[in-house]
């Protein structure tokens, strides 16, 4: 039944249409991005954050857990690396999933430079002043990681 429409020269007949309801996309990101670690440390365990729920839904409607990929490894130099959520293992009745890359910030590890103790007799020429550096990560050494 069509109501509210009038036309002098026409009558109205109702014809059914289709309403297609599509699933909205949830954005799956890296919780706490940028995530940080110190050079030489293992990558942290990444966790997901979700955005764009509708109608009061929460993460409880999601089945599965995303995984994360990054090119950063223990020996990767200090810098910023992309972390990408892999959403293929996620499922929800009313949603699709869209991964949103986050970042891993690898910060430089701290080295400690300690002056070596030396002795000299009063009036003598100063002895060579030397130091020891500690705190190298993995297979790094003073010879392959520093200059001076």
Image (cartoon, rainbow, N blue to C red):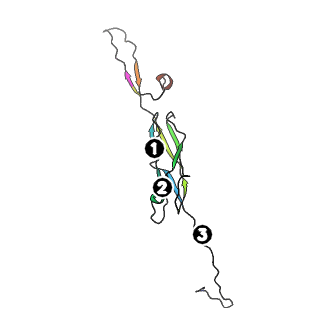
Q: How far apart are marks 2 and 1 (CA)?
A: 17 Å
N-term-proximal mark, 2 vs 3: 3
Give the magenta part as a residue range.
113-122
Q: What element carries label 3?
A: loop
Where residue 59 sits in the image (x, y, percent)?
46, 58
Magenta-span inclusion, residue 55: no
Categorize mark 1 by other alpha carbons within 10 Å: few (<14), some (14-19), many (20+).
few
The residue nearer to you, when weighing 13 against 4, is: 13
The residue nearer to you, when weighing 32 against 90, is: 90
Q: Which residue is drawn at 46% across and 23% down?
A: 142
Categorize mark 3 by other alpha carbons within 10 Å: few (<14), some (14-19), many (20+).
few
Q: In this view, does 65 lie to the left or right of 14?
A: left
N-term-proximal mark, 3 vs 1: 3
- The residue singled out by tag 1 in the image is 45
Q: Distance between the residues labelled 2 and 3?
A: 25 Å
- The residue singled out by tag 3 in the image is 20
- The residue singled out by tag 2 in the image is 50
**Toward which corner of the image does residue 111 lie, by quadrant?**
top left
Q: What element carries label 1?
A: loop
Magenta-span inclusion, residue 118: yes
Where residue 74 sits in the image (x, y, percent)?
49, 35
């Amino acid at each position: 039944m069509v109501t509210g429409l009038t036309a002098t020269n026409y009558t109205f007949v109702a014809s059914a249409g289709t309403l297609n309801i599509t699933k909205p996309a949830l954005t799956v990101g890296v919780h706490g991005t940028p995530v940080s670690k110190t050079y030489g440390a293992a990558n942290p365990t990444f966790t997901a954050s979700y955005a764009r729920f509708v109608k009061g839904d929460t993460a409880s409607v999601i089945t599965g857990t995303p995984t994360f990929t990054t090119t950063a490894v223990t020996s990767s130099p200090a810098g910023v690396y992309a972390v990408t959520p892999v959403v293929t293992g996620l499922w929800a009745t009313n949603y699709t999933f869209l991964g949103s890359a986050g970042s891993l910030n690898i910060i430089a590890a701290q080295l400690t430079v300690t002056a070596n103790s030396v002795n000299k007799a009063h009036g003598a020429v100063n002895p060579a002043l030397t130091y020891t550096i500690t705190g190298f990560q993995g297979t790094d050494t003073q010879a392959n990681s520093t200059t001076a």
